[in-house]
Amino acid sequence: MSTSQSTLVAAPAAAPATAPPSPRRRRVRPTRWVGVLFVLPATVYVLVYQLVPVVYGFVLSLTEYSPLSRSGPEWVGAANYTALLHDPDFGQALLVTGRYVLMVLPPTVAIALGLALLAARPFRGVGVFRSALYVPHIVSLTTVAVVWLWIYSPNGLVNEVLTTVGLAPQSWLLEQESALPAVAAMRVWKALGSNMVLLLAGLQSIPGELYEAASTDGAGALQRFRHITLPGLRPILTYVVAMDIIFLAQGFAELFILTGGGPLASTTTVNYLIYTEAFQYNGFGSASAMAFVLFAFIAAFSFLSIRGVAGRRS
Amino acid sequence: MQIPHPPTRRSVLALTAAGAVLSLTACGLGGPAAPQADQSGSGELTVWFPGTNTTEIELVTETIVPQFEQETGAQVEVTFLDWPDMSTKLNAAFAGGTAPDVFGHGPAAVADFVANERVVDLGPFLDQLDAADREDMAAALPGGQVDGTQYLMPLSLQANLLVYDADAFTEAGLDPDEPPATWVEAAEMGAELTERSGDRITRSGLLLPTHPIGLQQSFATLLYADGGRQLSEDGTTATFATPEGEEVLDYITSLFSGEDAVATGLGRDYSTLPPSQQPLVTGDAAMMIATAPQVQQMMAADPDLDLRVAPPMSFDGSTDPAAFGGAGPGLMINADSPDQELGWRFIEYMASPEVAVAYTEGIGAIPMRASAADSGYVQESETLQAFLAAAPAMVPNPNVPGWVQVRDTMAQHLERATNGAVPAAEALRQAATEVDDVLAKAR
């Protein structure tokens, strides 16, 4: 409200051309500058720590650059990008990244939604239930990965359970078929808490009168979920799906700790490849090019998912 | 209360853009090159050591460095970095102009620093030492050289030798005083020592490291023992795609696969496990390749364990015995250090006979000086004596620019072969092609 009022007050069109500046107009200018001052810190932060590195990263992607080199970046144009087209490792990493997102995203959202529906009900101990589910989100991903490294180890929890029920222990993180799903299972567990809380907030914003009216009209539980809950959750679902895609497509820490990108590169995501190229092989130019291609993919899939979940209606 | 509205087109675009920026900034791009930091050169020295061994940290920071400071009047600021972070932080420091005066690293990294003129030629400093002193370090010094020039002063020797559980030998009817003389014989003994429960191996008879770096080292160990070498003499081409290379790669694969397998856990990294969880301690293996510190730590974890070290072996008896090893991690001087003389004095102090023995004793490593064989530290340890005796047969990885990428490329293709994805010959051929490319680009 205050913004629109200021705009209306500041509009000079209604004032006569010869009239002296009104006292009300003179009061507006300092207000405007105060607003600028308020956004200045955030603007400087975004410029210095986000936009400038992004632009510099793009410039680096057009160069060949080793941090050890004394000559600095050498311009190579689009060579780093064209090289990626023929790089089987990069193609494989893109596929692994896509598989990883697909393995984690649907179960995470579906289970988190189920848990949010459960946590939205008033029952004894609901606070403890919600807190317990949120705890994994608070713990750092690195710490969680180290714990799960033990869980998946030859004498770890999972194999102990298998042995107890008479099944053979498995090398979860050492087999091509099981390594990525094993990491994905950990990531689902880690992401549940935050998604559940967001969806719970979404659920609590849906007016209860709608459910009462629907019940009065004879709508069953499934119909209420389909016609009231899901549409009501659409904005927050859109946010959850988009942010999950953005973060999952950059999967690194958990893979670094649990599998080291192996076996046979079956868990080498694009971000892992970027790390290797930049910090193991000192290829900052090609690593930057990979980062921008990953960026393009993430942006495209985020946009598509947002359109898909939110619909075209504005 | 109102039902939240679906996002508008503008909010969709804004969210996408925000996410995209977030994704890019999180990708961690490097910073620009900057001039070196202005350092005074007034008797102050910054030193980065690799490793997080608490014994080593205490020894260096509480004993060695204070003594050096007392003797020289210098001020030394020591930082220990986790091994996996070492290259990353060094590279960032060089790019940002904040690299330390003296830093430690493994021999594998030296050539890249040399190629970028980041480290000082230690030759003139070494020439100031007595000939007898240089001779005392003769086994270690070549591992710190690139094209015959000394850039790294090794602080220890390192080697991978076959270590076995003498009690397991006795239980299997083998003589623990007669370890295998060749790798072929080791596999045969491994078959005797392997224990199974149904189809599952419960104790590996012969366990070789097969995590990516370990697999490359296992391959190198056997290749050297079979008379082969990884790169040409001038370090420009791969020379492992040979019948010998194929033979030893098939050998490694056969240890882990098929009905006659003698080991389990292909790809598992045992090097990061604590001593009490090492396969020889838990009884999950009867023979395995290990380093001197690992053996000593395992024996400390289980004093009842009778671990013994086999001498370097030939692959099948047709060539001289060889072992993978040589110079261990050492120290280099930053070419931009304003006080290189003080840097050398610190290195010289670390490499002096008494300090060198105390340092290697503190970390359980093999001393790099031949004279250390007479020290109480070595005399009291049969393990160290065995490793020191193997020094003449040690062959290191080549010191060439791009070696880390060469090593990883080799490991990638070796892993494909050991997992049965491609035949050994094909894996080696592809690896050699890619390694040649890496070497050509790095020159």
Image: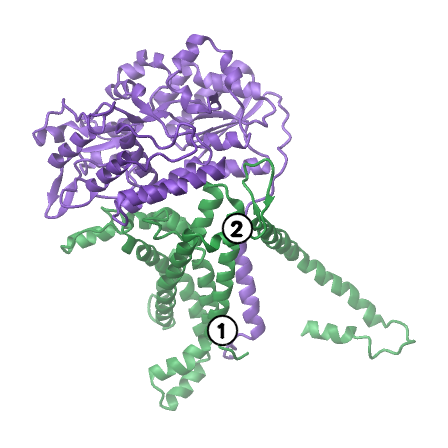
Chain colours: A green, B purple
Q: Are tags 2 and 1 found on a single chain?
A: yes
x, y percent for residue B150: 47, 21
Seen at 50% across and 79% down, the residue is B3
Nearer the observer, A128 or A251: A251
Which residue sits furthest bottom? A217
Q: Secondary structure at mark 1?
A: helix
Q: Report the amino acid beneath label 1.
A: Arg
Q: Nearer the viewer, mark 2 or mark 1?
A: 2
Quarter of the image holding residue B338? top right
x, y percent for residue A45: 62, 53
- Which subunit holds the residue at mark 1? A
Q: Callout 2: few (<14), some (14-19), or many (20+) C-alpha neighbours within 10 Å? A: many
Dot 2 or dot 1: first in sequence order is 2
Q: Which residue is mark 2?
A: A80
Label number found at residue A184: none
Q: CA distance from mark 2 to mark 1?
A: 31 Å
Callout count: 2
Indicate left or right for A54 with A26 as reference.
left
Position of residue B376 relative to residue B31, above or below, is above
Nearer the observer, B218 or A259: B218
Label number found at residue A307: 1
- Which subunit holds the residue at mark 2? A
Q: Is residue A140 visible?
A: no
Q: Is residue B107 visible?
A: yes
Q: Secondary structure at mark 2?
A: helix
Which residue sits furthest left? B173
Q: Report the amino acid beneath label 2.
A: Asn
Quarter of the image holding residue B379? top left
Position of residue B393 relative to residue B192, above or below, is above
